Image (cartoon, rainbow, N blue to C red):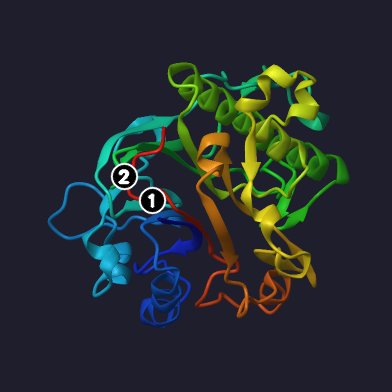
Amino acid sequence: MRLATFNLESLDDSAKARVDFAARAAVLRPALERLDADLVCLQEVNAQHVPGARERQLHALDRLLEGTPYAAYHRAVSSGPGGRALADVHNLVTLSRFPIAAQREVHHAFVAPPLHAAIGPEMGSAPAPVTFDRPLLLTHIELDSGATLALINVHLRAPLASPVAGQKRGPFAWRTVGGWAEGFYLSALKREAQALELRLLIEEVLERDAAALIAVAGDFNAEDWSATLRLAVAAEEDLGASELATRSLIVLDRALPADRRWSVLHHGRPQMLDHILASRVLYGHFRGIEVHNEGLGDEALGYGKALHSAASYHAPVVATFDFGSAAPR
């Protein structure tokens, strides 16, 4: 079984798209085909208005997958604010060659929105809730072996400052350092709080079945050993309790050679922001992992030249598992 994650970076074919769809498809489709995956966790899939349809559709994704095996895969999709229909941008999509027995969106199910009281000129205003940008997408996949895989598709908040009232001069320009710092803090708060919710979701799955096959795949917007990954992994050394070691997840990209372990290039600095994590039982079936970063461009250089790439500035990651002919115990 091959499990992949790929951030498509605002896949779109509407009039708002910054790059011609045909150009994007010509680059992204071969990248998807190279994955040769049975399961694919996609991030940043935009939805489009289609004539005659009451709600937005994943028209661009349908066009991208046309002519590939993925077009016939089962599909689970996240919804927009309030759980209604699709979001206009950055939907999560999980594609599966295997049947999807159930799906669930998790959005502040375990962690209530933290309250933040504005700092600076807005100080004194009533605290406002800080909500996650999108849900976690949990699917239960019925594998050929007879086992069930709990697969969680994630896309956590990027380390870019969140908007702060009255503090911005433009998309990336701020009026004050304090305003930027507050916005950066809010983004970190969203990311860490949702990583906590992810961990609590994993705990719920393990409470029901201590030997559950669990995989978490997606764009964490965080490197290994960060607070974000430590929350999700819950390593034995952090827990300080050997009897809880079976609850920890394994960061599979640690199996990559150091010079290959990066999924984003930023100002010449390689970073591994996209990860696949596995429960202990699933880890027993892990056989290898690849990151397809050979053609990856530097996102900072692209942004500096106002270049909207036909490709993605995130490399896809794919892990291989072997269940043999019998269902895992």
Name the residue rendered at 80%, 28% in the picture.
237
Instruction: Measuring from the top left, give residue 297's x and y in whole percent.
Output: 65, 77
CB of mark 2 within 8 Å of CB of mark 1? Answer: yes
Name the residue rendered at 39%, 32% in the picture.
105
SS class, disc 1: loop
Instruction: Measuring from the top left, give residue 72's x and y in whole percent.
Output: 21, 61
With 265 as the anchor, is 139 left or right in this view? Answer: left
Q: In terms of depth relative to the viewer, which is nearer, 244 or 216? A: 244
Residue 42 in which image quadrant: bottom left
- Quadrant of the image for the C terminus? top left
Give the residue number, with chain letter if any, for mark 2: 145
Give the residue number, with chain letter if any, for mark 1: 324
Name the residue rendered at 48%, 63% in the picture.
8
- Quadrant of the image for the N terminus? bottom left
SS class, disc 2: loop
Which of the numbered marks, if any, corresponds to residue 242?
none
Amino acid type of the residue tagged 2 in the rendering:
Ser
> In 3D space, how far apart are the residues under numbered discs 2 and 1 (Cα atoms)?
8 Å
Q: From this viewpoint, which residue is outermost toward the front?
A: 325
Amino acid type of the residue tagged 1 in the rendering:
Gly
Instruction: Measuring from the top left, give residue 54's x and y in whole percent.
Output: 17, 47
Is residue 190 in view? no
Q: In terms of depth relative to the viewer, which is nearer, 193 or 272? A: 272
Name the residue rendered at 34%, 37% in the picture.
147
Instruction: Measuring from the top left, give residue 4's x and y in whole percent.
Output: 47, 58
Q: From this viewpoint, which residue is outermost toward the left?
A: 52
Q: In terms of depth relative to the viewer, which is nearer, 230 or 12? A: 230
The correct choice, above or below, for 21 with respect to 39 in the image is below
